[in-house]
Every structure is written in C-alpha cells, then in structure tokens.
Image (cartoon, grey):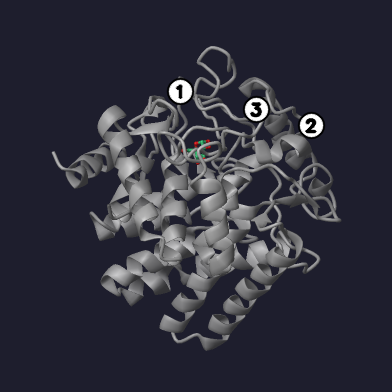
C-alpha cells in the first residue's frame, strides 16, 4: 500500500461522528476525544485526501467555542469511563477550559487554496475572527503584543523542558510530577473563576515562542481570508497585529540569534533550547542570515539536533534530553507515554519542514521528510519515536504521521 492509502486508512479508522459533527480521534486507544490543534493537523492531512472531511473536522472543532471566543482544546463528544486517558476536572461540562496553538486560520486557508470554496470561508469566518480577537484581547490584556499561555498544555507540548523553571521542576523528573503540577494549574483556573489577567497570570503566564509564531502565521492567514471575503478592514487589522507580534518577539525574545520563551512581567528569558528555536522560521521571523546560522550551528550539529532520526524535540546537549521519554509504569497517572523532552514528533517535523522551505533550504527539508517516512515505514504510525533508535513510542495508530502527505519528499 502506498503512503497515501495508508494515511487514508488510518484517518478513516479514527473518524468519528456525533449527530451532525464529524471529527478524527488522534488515537482510538488513548485519545478517544477531539483535540483542537490535532484537528487543525487533521484538516491539513485531509486536504490531501478528502476536502469535505477536512471542512467538517474544523467546523466541529469550533462548534463548542466559548462566548468570549476561546476554542477549547478538548471536546468530549462522548465520555468513556474505561479509557486510559484520565478524566480531568475542567469546570466545564463537555469541554476543557484551556486552548491550544492557533493553527486554525492556517488550516482553513490551506483548504481554501485547494478548492476556492468561499461558502466554507463564510461559514467559519466569524469563529476565526472571534478566536484570534480573544487571543489579542484576553491573552495580551495590556497590549504588549505577545500572547500568553496559562498552562504548558496550551502549547501542545505538555511536558516540554521550556516550562520546567516556571513549574519549579528540575531537568530530570518523572512524568507524574509534571502531570501533577499541570493538574494543579487546571484547578487554579477554576479557583480563579476563569479570570486570567487578575488571577491566573500569577500562577503561570508564559509567552511561548511556538505559540506566538503560530499566532503570527494564523493572523497573516486570517488577513488573507478576510481579503478573499472582501473585508479589507479586517485584512489590514489582522496583518497589523501579526506585524506587531513579530516586532515584539524580535525585541523581547531574541538573544544571540535565538528566540527564547519568556515569563513574568519583565520578560525573563527561559534559556532552554528545544526545537522551538527553529519555530520562528515557520512564520519567517528570522532573517535569512539568522536562519542560516541557526541551521548550521544547531540543526546540522551532531552534538545537538542531528541525531540518527530527525528531529529531536530537545537537542542532545540539553540536561533534560531523554530520547525515549519515561518508561511505562513510571507514569502512574497517565498510561500514555508523552514526552516532549527528546523524542521525535511528526508535528514538529512538519513545522520545521515548512520553515526550512521558507528559506530555500530544500535539501534539508527533504531530509526531514525522508526521515519522517522512514520512521513510519519502520514502526508504523506512532505518537512519538526515539530519535536515537527510531523505536516507536506511545500511542499506536496515531494520526500525526499523516502530515507526511504535506511534506513532499
Ligand atoms: C498529547 C500531546 C498534545 C495533543 C494530545 C492529543 O497531550 O502532547 O499536543 O494535542 O496528546 O493528541
């Protein structure tokens, strides 16, 4: 079976419907719900396979949008009592109370570019506008032009070492401890009665690099969508905000050629290197010379990111580096195997692949795509992979490998 057929089979196997809604579960075994940025990836994958399914996926992902514009990162269309995934108290009925990286406008534009269906744009435009306005308003309440997240899980990289310092964790700790800290933050959000700028920000308020990069790209793409709909005021407005965030990222996050996430009112830099140092290439925030330096010094460096399988989420020379992640059994609360502390994740490969292409590093982009395909050939569609041995880890029949369809080899 060729790769396109294999991905189609996987996506159909993981497809679920609920009343008029259709969505895809990331893995039938450990992730039986709908996740927001996963749905954005699914829409990109499905844009190569079945454009109507891609649209349905996004329409269901926005269907539980909060009144203030936030799109929750999880929707429990059905609750499973026997699932491996722990039931978390969110203070909401059938959704979580946090969000995930705002990739949705980029996914919508990608769909539109393949069939030019303006009706779909019209149908989803208000959801997009309300969501990005929510981020600009509630996640940047003082108008500083950087977007804050209130929990590591909002980054999509639940236990990334970028968040260790703010959570008071050392570079080596068990998944249980990290999960416990994040659960405490979920509980704080309920205690804060979902009030962010006067309450929640005292517990966790990180300006994360990939989240801001994805916001910039999302705002630029939303601006293009507004233009297609003849809404020139919105076109200018969203583009202007993308520009302001880009400018501020350069001013407050860039140091010696690298963007770092920041925290606290005075924008303290979190000087931990992860794949996030490449993320700004996705929205062309580095200059060409900066990107070239970064690729040579870090991506092509055997002591850092150049491992047998690309791309490690954390480079080899970081104290938190662990190519495999915690072994099953250590994590008592989570039966899954999540680790953003070294293993390869296909979403990272997709972001970096497109970032490399933006700067014309085509051979290297191809190498990322080739390594991704090799991992799938070798181990199947797994949640993550050991970057030293290629061994598949975590959930099986995990959808993100489908992103290879959006990375030409
Ligand atoms: C894990 C990942 C997160 C993803 C979720 C569902 O929690 O860290 O990014 O959205 O699984 O796949």
Q: Earlier in the sequence, mark 2 or mark 3?
A: 2
Q: Decide which of 237, 349 is in the foreground and name it.
A: 349
Mark 2: secondary structure: loop
Q: Residue 300 at x, y = what percent?
A: 48, 46
Mark-to-mark CA distance, 3 and 1: 17 Å
Residue that numbered label 1 is attached to: 83
Q: Is residue 295 visible?
A: yes
- Mark 3 closeness class: few <14, some 14–19, many ≥20 residues within 10 Å: some
365 to 237, vertically: above or below = above
Of the pair 118 and 11, the residue shown nearer to us: 11
Q: Are marks 1 and 2 in contact (CB under 8 Å)?
A: no
Q: Secondary structure at mark 3?
A: helix
Are the residues tagged 3 and 1 within 8 Å (C-beta)? Answer: no
Of pointers 3 and 1, the one earlier in the residue sequence = 1
Quarter location, residue 209: bottom right
Whole-Å distance between the Cαs marked 2 and 3?
A: 13 Å
- Provide residue 309's location: percent of width, then percent of height: 40, 35
Mark 3, residue position? 179
Earlier-in-chain disc, 1 versus 2 = 1
Q: Going 60% across and 46% down the picture, which residue do you hit?
A: 155
Q: Residue at x 47, y 65 (%)?
A: 105
Q: Does dot 1 land on a helix, a strand or a loop?
A: loop
Of circles 1 and 2, which is in front? Answer: 2
Instruction: From the image, state whether disc 2 or disc 3 is nearer to you.
Output: 2
As drawn, 343 above or below 3: above
Direction from residue 406 to residue 37 in the image, left or right: right
Q: Is residue 401 above or below residue 123?
A: above
Q: Position of residue 301 (x, y in %)?
A: 52, 43
- Residue at point 51%, 27% (across, down): 323
Specify the label residue 168 is tagged with. Answer: 2
């Amino acid at each position: 079976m060729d790769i396109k057929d294999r991905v189609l089979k996987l996506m159909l196997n993981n497809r679920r419907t609920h009343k008029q809604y259709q969505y895809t579960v990331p893995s039938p075994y450990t992730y039986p719900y709908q996740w927001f940025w996963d749905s954005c990836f699914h829409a990109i994958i499905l844009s190569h396979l079945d454009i109507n399914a891609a649209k349905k996926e996004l329409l269901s992902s926005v269907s539980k949008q909060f009144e203030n514009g936030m799109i929750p990162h999880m929707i429990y269309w059905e609750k499973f009592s026997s699932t491996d995934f722990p039931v978390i108290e969110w203070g909401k009925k059938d959704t979580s109370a946090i969000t995930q990286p705002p990739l949705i406008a980029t996914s919508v534009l990608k769909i539109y570019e393949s069939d030019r269906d303006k009706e779909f744009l019209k149908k989803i435009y208000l959801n997009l506008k309300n969501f990005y306005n929510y981020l600009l308003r509630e996640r940047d309440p003082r108008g500083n032009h950087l977007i804050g997240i209130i929990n590591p899980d909002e980054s999509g990289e639940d236990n990334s070492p970028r968040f260790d310092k703010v959570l008071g964790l050392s570079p080596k700790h068990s998944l249980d401890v990290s999960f416990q800290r994040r659960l405490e933050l979920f509980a704080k959000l309920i205690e804060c009665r979902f009030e962010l700028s006067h309450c929640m920000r005292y517990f966790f308020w990180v300006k994360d690099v990939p989240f801001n990069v994805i916001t910039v790209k999302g705002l630029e793409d939303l601006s293009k969508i507004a233009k297609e709909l003849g809404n020139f005021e919105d076109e200018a407005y969203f583009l202007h905000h993308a520009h302001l965030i880009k400018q501020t990222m350069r001013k407050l996050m860039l140091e010696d050629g690298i963007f770092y996430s920041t925290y606290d009112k005075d924008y303290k830099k979190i000087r931990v290197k992860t794949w996030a140092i490449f993320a700004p290439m996705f929205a062309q925030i580095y200059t060409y010379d900066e990107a070239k330096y970064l690729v040579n010094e870090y991506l092509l460096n055997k002591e850092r990111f150049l491992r047998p399988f690309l791309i490690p989420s954390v480079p080899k020379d970081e104290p938190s580096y662990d190519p495999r992640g915690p072994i099953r059994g250590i994590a008592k609360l989570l039966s899954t195997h999540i680790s953003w502390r070294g293993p390869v994740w296909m979403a990272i490969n997709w972001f970096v692949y497109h970032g490399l292409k933006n700067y014309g590093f085509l051979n290297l982009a191809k190498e990322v795509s080739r390594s991704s395909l090799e991992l799938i050939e070798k181990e199947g569609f797994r949640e993550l992979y050991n970057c030293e041995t290629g061994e598949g880890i975590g959930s099986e029949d995990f959808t993100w490998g489908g992103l290879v369809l959006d990375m030409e080899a």
